[in-house]
Image (tube, rainbow, N blue to C red):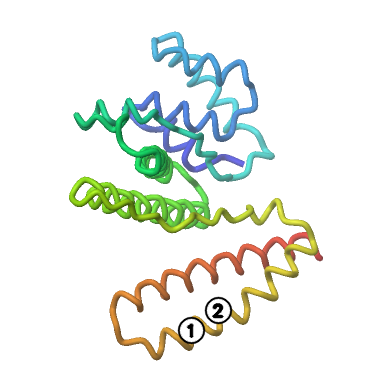
Amino acid sequence: MAIASITNWLNSKEKNYHNGRLLYEQYGESKTLQTLFKTGSTNFHFKKLLLALEDLNKLANLEPKQITIPDVIATTKEIGGKYGVDYESAPEAIQEIIKNKNDHYARARKLHESIRIMDNQEHRLEAGLQLIKHMEYVYDAWSAINEWKDNGRIRELEKEVTETDVSELTTSQLYKELNNLKPNISKDRTKLKNLTEPKKQADVAKRLQDREYRLKLIKERMANESL
């Protein structure tokens, strides 16, 4: 089937090479072409990319799928140079916060760049939620960095809990998480009704949204695989 984002790119009068390359990375299987498209954006590269996307869009078995966001990590020295601060002499804990902050910000920017060419609405929603989480860490990290700069106190940031992708869970893990999510969602809904403080309401509402979306993904996988 034709993919909407590829069709839109092919029909566009001003074809953006970078967006086209992202589309091929999303749907194309040729590692040789993927590598070639990263080496430049000359007329030669553009023509090869155009032909590759035209061929892709003719495939009958092509289905919308989510873009893979690559890791983007800079060194503490690079970060310090960017902001004109000698972070290399900062305590190790602060250097770690800065490194993680830069990582989260780079991922957020990549997500923001990629969301607009995702075909599937659920993929866009999932990417949007990931983007929000990354930026929340960035804001919290800056707060901790400024706190250290102002009074020398090092505040430990909340540890990030990385969820295993639903597609990677075993059958037993799926059922276990399903059974844990249902009562936790019920508790969050009850708690949200009784809260009056805006900050706490926002925190619980966001957690509830994340849990409900996670539950939806688990149910969909179980239905598709008839577990």
Which label is found at residue 142? none
Give whichever of 161, 42 is nearer the camera: 161
Tell me: residue 77, above or below residue 175: above
Q: Which image quadrant is residue 16 in?
A: top left
**Secondary structure under the numbered disc 2 in the rendered image:** helix
Which dot marks residue 189?
1
Residue depicted at x 30% and y 74%: 199
Where is residue 124? Give x, y as percent: 46, 52
Give neighbour class at mark 2: few <14, some 14-19, many 20+ (Cα, 10 Å): some
Which residue: 42% across, 33% down? 9
Eyeballing the image, is 101 above or below 81?
below
Pointer 1 and pointer 2: residues touching (CB < 8 Å)? yes
Cα gap from disc 1 to disc 2, whole angstroms: 6 Å
Amino acid type shown at disc 1: Arg
Residue at position x 56%, y 84% in the image: 186
Left or right side of 158 for 64: right
